[in-house]
Image (cartoon, helix red, strand yellow):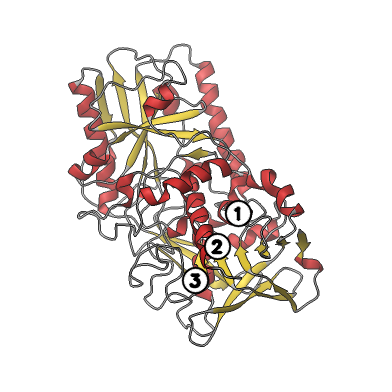
Amino acid sequence: MHIDARELENDHIIEGDICIIGAGAAGLSMALEWDNTPYKVILLESGGFEYESALQDLNSGDLTGQKYFPLQSTRLRYFGGTTGHWTGLCSPLDEVDFMKLDYLPHSGWPISKQDLDPFYVRAQEKLQLGPYEYEHEYWKKTRPNLNAFPLDNDIVGTKIWQINPARFGAIYKNRIVKSNNIHLYTYASVTNISSNEAVNKIQGLTVKNHTGKNYRVMAKHYVMACGAIQNARLLLTSKNHSPKGLGNDNDVVGRYFMEHLDIKAAGELWLYEKFKTDLYSYGATKAEMTLTDNAQIANKILNTTVAISPLSIGKHMKPLIETWQEEDPRKALKTTENRSFMSKLVRLKTKVWKPTAFDMDCTSEQAPNPNSRVTLSEVEDALGIQKAHLHWELSPIDKQTIRKTLQIIGTQMGQKKLGRVKINEFFREGNDDFMSGTVSGGFHHMGTTRMHENPKYGVVDANCQVHGISNLFVAGSGCFTTSGAVNPTLTLVALSLRLSDYLKGIAKI
């Protein structure tokens, strides 16, 4: 069922059993789990079904610290959310990503990968992917010539992605609109979450839109699925009985913002002879080199993947941080597509390229850093809510990880007499946390409402419930304790399905 909130009377009251704020990958994954049940589900979407500049402007905010993309263009504010322009790369986190590591402060999830495995299986279906199989040997049986470099398997592994740019808005719109018990409200921006005086239970939401109307939403359980930055912003701005913001007694909301470091031309790989393989190119799957869990722990570094592409093409590709600087995501996407077109043009114009020379691009985990955080700006948006301020801050281990990973792969290449690796001069030495302004992010916002059993170090518990508030939950990658090195969508959908099951177990509604 669909209701355009702009057509409701001012001060209208919306009541239901469970309210989900946000209709992106996390929110829709949850809502679909409640379809055809006896429960009335309220699904609130800030935008409509298409892109609108006035709604997109609500994402804008301030930036300090490491150079980053304009906040306005990093998320799409309409039905389906940012799946409207994602690339569809999916892979689960590794076991090491959940571990508490002695060399990595603030690491350690209160759940394990085994706890998520059954929900990863279900997330594969939601994202319309293949089987829950991410081992190289499995995929090697399905396609010829998926040969990995013959390196030491105890040290260097193969990270597999499955690819399907599933646009949740297009795939699931009809099912949501036709549902008898899911009530989708578009143009319904939540501007405040109201608690009781004891701040242990949510009593309702304030909803607004550009018509100037106000609405009240009342439910038994509330799930925030607005994305890591907007979830933190909404908690921080909800201060009716909590001066620091909801769930923020320990000043943790908004902290530990993490991104994946997307580093173009971190190194070069020069093979002695041509190596025949289709493994490292796009197909139904995509693969990159990575270090095994044991190798990461032995070398006290973070998780990183290394992609290769022909050097004659890679050296002409600008870092994404340089091409994606438009506030309008449509213009930024066009600029980025032109960047890709240029690489194809280079390939066509290059009469001879060396099939033994490759550019090495790294995608690396960011260490959780409490100083990397989302706070509130002094500037208000069109609905009267303080905008987000993002301070993105890195740590020395982030830079050390890139260097060490490339050194290990280079050593392996030399020992196996396959070739040699040349590391970008910037990463060759130094233990500082300075990163060049050419280091990009992956549009992967994580960690601002992190999961931890202790409320001093996290915002939600192992069940994604905000500490101390019985009926408020958070869905999405903001709950990640650490980020791993892979795209977060598969994991955030799996976490959302796990949360949905938990709610069904406790929701005696």
Q: Residues within 10 Å of mark 3 (few under 14, many from 20)?
A: many
Nearer the observer, disc 1 or disc 3? 1
Q: Are marks 1 and 2 in contact (CB under 8 Å)?
A: yes
Q: Nearer the viewer, residue 381 or 26?
A: 26
Residue 389 locus on image (x, y percent): 48, 65
Left or right of 68, for residue 35 = right
* SS type, badge 3: strand
| Residue at image point 49% right, 27% down | 282
Q: If you read the primary sequence from the N terminus, does the residue marked by circle 1 or circle 3 appear first?
A: 1
Label annotation for residue 376: 3
Q: Nearer the viewer, residue 26 or 179?
A: 179
Question: Which residue is identified by label 2?
Answer: 504
Left or right of 68, for residue 395 = left
Quadrant of res 449: bottom left
Residue 247 locus on image (x, y percent): 45, 74
Which residue in the rendered view is the most extreme toward the bottom? 197
Label annotation for residue 33: 1
| Residue at image point 62% right, 51% down | 328
* SS type, badge 2: helix
